[in-house]
Amino acid sequence: MSRIGVFICHCGSNIGATVDVPKVVEAARTLPHVVYADDNKYTCSDPGQQSIRDAIEEHDLDRIVIASCSPRMHELTFRKMLHQTRINPYLLEIANIREQCSWVHKDIEAGTAKAIDLVRMAAAKIDRDTPLYTTTIPVNKRALVIGGGIAGMQAALDIADAGYPVTLVEKEPSLGGKMVMLDKTFPTMDCSACICTPKMAEVGTHPRIEVRTCAEVEKVAGYVGNFEVTIREAPKHVDYELCTGCGLCESKCPTKITSEFDQGLGKRKAIYKPFAQAVPSKPTIDAAHCRKINEGKCGVCEKLCPTGAIRFDDEEKRSTETYGAIIVAIGYQLIDWADLYGEYGGRVASPNVITGLQFERLVNASGPTEGHIQRPSDGTEPKSVVIVKCVGSRDPHKGKAYCSRACCMYGAKHAHQYLDKVPDGRCYVFYMDVRTPGKGYDEFYMNTQRDGAVYLRGRVSKIYEQGGKLVCLGEDTLAGATVQVEADLVVLETAMVPADDADRLGSMLGVTRDKDLWLSEAHPKLRPVETNSGGVYLAGTCQGPKDIPDTVAQASAAAMKVCILFSKDELESNAMIAGSDVGLCNGCGACVAICPYQAVTLEEVTRRENSVMVTRTVSNVNPGLCQGCGACTVACKPGAMDLKGFSDEQIMREVEALCL
Amino acid sequence: MRYAYFPGCSAASTGISFTLSASYVAKRIGLELVEMPDWCCCGTSAALVTSRDLAHALPARSLALAEQAGLDLDVVTPCAGCFSSLKRTVHYARQSDKNRHRLEEIIELPYAATADVMSLLEVMARPEAMEPLAAAITKSLNGLRVASYYGCALVRPQEVTCFDDPEDPQSMDSLMELAGAEPVRWAFKTECCGASHQISEPHGARRLIARVFENAAANGAEAIAVACPLCMLNLDMREAGINESRAVPFDIPVFYFTELLGLAMGGSARRLGIDRHFWPTGKAVRKALAPPPEPSPDNHSTSELPQEVTVA
Amino acid sequence: MPVNEAPTASAATAATAATAATAFEPTILAFCCHWCTYSGADLAGLNRMSYPANVRVLRVPCSGRVNPQFVLTALNKGCDGVLVCGCHPGDCHYVSGNYFARRRLMAFKRLLEFTGLEPERFQVRWISGSEAGKFRDTVIEVCDQIRALGPYRSGVSDDVSLNG
Amino acid sequence: MSFYNLSSTSSGDLAAIAQITRDAGVNLDDCYQCGKCSAGCPLSDEMDLYPRKVIRMLQLGQVSAVLKSRAPWVCATCMTCTARCPQQIDIDSLMLSVRHAAKRAGLRPVREADIFDDLFMAGVRRYGKSNEALLAARFNLSSGHLFQDVLNAPKMAKRGMIGPSLHKVKDRAAMRRLFGRALRTTEGEKGDGI
């Protein structure tokens, strides 16, 4: 027999004005198992709480109902109060008679009747409440950062500097990501390599950061504090223990391949570092193009290597390790414009139609043209350049509906750089809107106009080659005239889209993706770096298009969240979670399929049933992963699965209490 | 290969060469075309600007009569304009029963919209036609540089036409390649020829023709191939007029793609209707039919960034 | 209708029914998910919006927690209408709970309607934590609908169970 | 230059615009005025209002200026605008609906286009098929461009492209009935889609 105490709050006049509180108290006293009921001016105040504690002692209560404001307001307050008593904090129900009763109903009679109903429902429910306990989960204080661009590097450095070990996984042979491909960064025009490569070196030499290049996350199991992560490393065919990075192999390799780093505008070798300042500063062999590996001939690198570091028979490696937290920083890629925009030439476009990232390589002093802006087709200096913004962005028909955020500044920077290097050149920028919120951004854009860039408001409709020129047809909607520009070079500022890996990684980590496959944060305003998966955080453009300052800020924020997690030795799990009754479970696995957190697994148990030992497959809930949504309870046909704190019986009792 | 055939109003008049060459090629590759009973004009854009109902009803009448006659075949039409009207009607009728009933009420005939509509180009570019085409082609066109001109109606709107890329279609190019011609990569494949505006709005519309010739010439085309009698008339008949105001005249003959296929099969210019063109075709035909071999220098390499292998 | 004609039997019944309907105040149970609709309902209170007192909110963690059995019980034991409210599809706090709810409850709703239940008596709505106005409007609308239908005389058999 | 008093837009103007957009199946609010339609339009040089501006004026409620515009009559329905519109607005269809609305209002800003299309349809109504030579001759007479293309006529005759006989459908009465019924209904009650 439970002994229920009911406490009705006046909340000053907030409740008392439209609900007849004494009448509710009277009604409460008649409810089954209610041994005590009283009212209070302000239940949440210290004296209010004290009177509840006194009543518990005096009347030997073993559970309480508080009729007051919303549980979203004070449920935690009252649970904390119960901590100081002998009652389990979960033996508490709140009847919301303020937000959902007194504040919305003007009629005292109807409001009072409803308040009585709500109290009756709460009392019926609490009669079936059981004490609940949180468990603790150990925290493994090692972080995994996926992606070695500026976001991943910043996050790894921050966590490592705070004293925790970090593994940084990068799928390319070098750290640096997209930022290290850039020439200069807006609006300050500091050289990207000059600020990015020191970070790369710092990461590479940090005693608490382990860098794994040519590596990908293959599998993730476990939960916050205890992720089991399998990392696959592609063969590098070079023994990094022996290699000194002297570069002799690369200089003598006879095979030339289009350079990915130079965005197809330059060449690299089959054994290569993507770029001079690569970290690690050691080469890898591109097995797809190596003659020795494919044809058995050549082997020049092996013959020349002074330390004997070449390993043609190198194989991929897999390792599984435990991490407490994961930061996803896999960045973005550029939309494949050629597939979408036949009107700009599509797959058969002139080589002189390039992307902004290709322009970065063209204008970069260590790029394929040593920083001389040249037409890819013939190496001449373009005297007229057209920059087209919003290619693939703000285009729900052919590309993406969203704005890619960085391109307005990126385009302005390209115009500025071109006019800087080719002072007698002409530069036209086709734009739809100029969006430059940011410190010093609009000033930069205005200066680009002063540099001589002609801004034309309109989308380009067609780009075609005629007489060695690229004819661009557009409208300047400000002049209200269609315009034609005959350009030597066209730069398309293409949309940012999620990295190829985003979807796979998202589903592996239980991170939702939005309709464009960007990884979703837990809350767009208040939890911008957390995800719906505990212990998994987002940094940089994998969450959505952004520029470098925002990326770095978000990376440090994500690192901070990891450090907060690591500041505790143990985590307290949610007490209101699902649990399965082994006796009823038939092992059908419906709960496993419906669980969005992979918290339910099937396992074999051997137990005595009717005095025989039986081995059966039953479901098991991992308390670290279960978030308490209750989807499994409805999916469970034999009725074995139930949710603590919102059990089938409790809800049924509430329903019945209402219908009395 | 058996289709119901919608010749279109120009088949026996301005499009006579198309009719001659198409029937020649069709016969050679076993493509049987059964003319639809008592078909009427598709209405083309003139009906559309008059009334949407009329624009759907005219093709619906011809299609419904074919159904009534038990002609259970998909429909093929050589004219791009007719294709566009017929295809749009089928699309409209299939969108809802309400639409279909509306048409039935106007044309006083039951119309089930079962038959699909295709252009002659689409039919010939299908694998089952490409095979006999390849077998029937006995002569190579000697690498004649042909710019394939598709115009608007075959490719737009893509949701309705369901045919080839609206900016850079390839089907005619691949037929030209099959005939031994060299497809020209150019940018005006699907730009408008001006259609009937060449009569009603000649001043502005002439420029459209000039743009097409200009880009074809700039990309080294020796001939233009078309798949529409109106495109043909606008380009071929008006090339001389365009040249009057030009210092350097164009000299690009225009052919129906079926004429070029016919030439490659050994058909005579007369039989194919090539002798009825306005702009002289002799030079191009002579080049196309010159006795091989005469390997043309390959100055037309693709600019795709090559993964080249150079030996040090 | 000619003025001198005596009221027909059906008109008299309709008149009685109308009187009964105005006097009748339905009991409506609303299952609201904690993260969206329940906070939307709180916000309606915070904004001192006003809606009929007929609705009783039962808080669940997620609309996916709502077992059709709960709905059956409510209707059987005397509720005149049941409302299930959750986050908008795609916004579920628990990733996909409301998708499960939508699929399951829509099938269930069709079944109920097949057995003769008026569609208005069991409704599923998506109301976010910021949509206080929508919560109020929904309550008013559903209340009006059910008031017009009159009291519910349980037509759903106790034997109908989807859970076993 | 133009001055629009936007406050003087009448409810009749808004209703007319609503009917045009409903007929066309477009939503004017989708347009963000990028001008890609105008830039790609092969006949924009001949237009007093670019396609983009037609939409803009309708957005601003200036329907009478749009109805007087040459643009929808100059449009060759090549559909380049629609194919390239980033917002998937069926501009081609909008131009048609504006032209229909203008015609209903008794306006024909481009006389030649109207004459040509009317003559074309009159021919089809009468014979069921179009006879190009007859059409061209009648157009020259009606439009006053008496000598347009006359030099081409003998050349066409020589090539067998035009002849003395007219081709026609068998059931000419059915054609007249079809036209009667198709033109009887107004655009407002058309079916689904376009």
Image (cartoon, grey):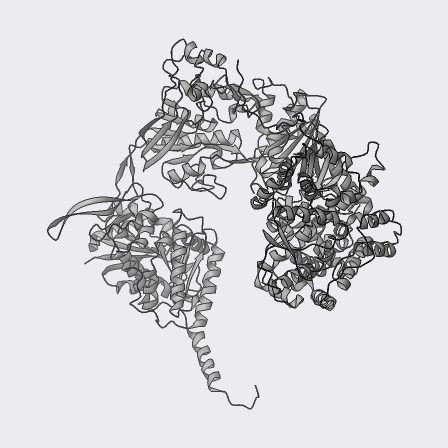
| Number of marks | 0
Q: Is residue B288 above or below residue C59?
A: above
Locate the N terminus of chain A and report the quarter of the image it occupies.
bottom left
Q: Is residue B91 visible?
A: yes
Locate the C terminus of chain A and report the quarter of the image it occupies.
bottom left
Q: Judge by depth and name the residue closer to the eye, A569 or A411.
A: A411
Residue A409 at x, y percent in the picture: 60, 31
Residue A151 at x, y percent in the picture: 46, 29
Q: Is residue A29 above or below residue B250?
A: below
Q: Judge by depth and name the residue closer to the eye, C105 or A11.
A: C105
Is B76 placed left or right of A66 in the picture?
A: right
Residue B38 at x, y percent in the picture: 69, 62
Which residue is outermost to the top?
A306
Q: Is residue D26 visible?
A: no
Res A398 → quadrant: top right
Res A175 → quadrant: top left
Q: Judge by depth and name the residue closer to the eye, D171 or B154.
A: D171
Residue B208 at x, y percent in the picture: 76, 42
Q: Is residue A66 above or below residue A324?
A: below
